[in-house]
Amino acid sequence: MSESLKLDFGDYTVGGDNYNYTYVDRKSEGDLKSTLSGGNFDRFKKELDRARLFNSYLFIVVESSIEKIKKNNIFSPHKSKLPYIWHNFKFYIFNQIFNRFR
């Protein structure tokens, strides 16, 4: 049986006796690029900060590969600034991981 509830961060978790502070945030290719660009990135950083505040783990699952994202970006009429997106992802995510274990 599943139940839909509003989460403070992430898209999915397990409740009840199986709850272990682990959440999953599912991203399509477009959602990932949008999330890591502009004002959406600030919102996403706040979501990561909330997960950290609750001593939780947030796994980000991307429904694509880096190679496919790069290829799709070449042929897209609306190209994303992928170096900027990769920088945001690596810089902030790795800082979150590093700071968690200090």
Image (cartoon, rainbow, N blue to C red):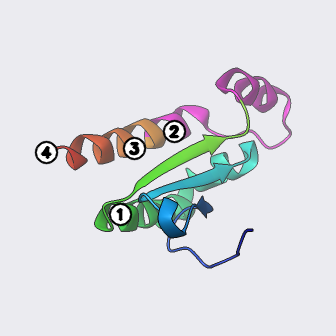
Residue that label 3 marks = 93
Segment colored magenta: 65-87
Q: Is mark 1 in CB contact (under 8 Å) with mark 4?
A: no
Q: Earlier in the sequence, mark 1 or mark 2?
A: 1
Q: Amino acid at mark 4?
A: Arg
> Mark 4 or mark 2: which is in front?
4
Q: Amino acid at mark 1?
A: Asp
Residue at 73% in and 33% down: 64
> Mark 2 or mark 3: which is in front?
3
Rendering quarter of residue 93? top left
Residue at 47% in and 52% down: 58
Residue that label 2 marks = 84
Distance between the Cα atoms at labels 3 and 1?
11 Å
Q: Earlier in the sequence, mark 1 or mark 4?
A: 1
Residue at 64% in and 47% down: 32
Residue that label 4 marks = 102
Residue pushed farthest left? Answer: 102
Distance between the Cα atoms at labels 4 and 2?
27 Å
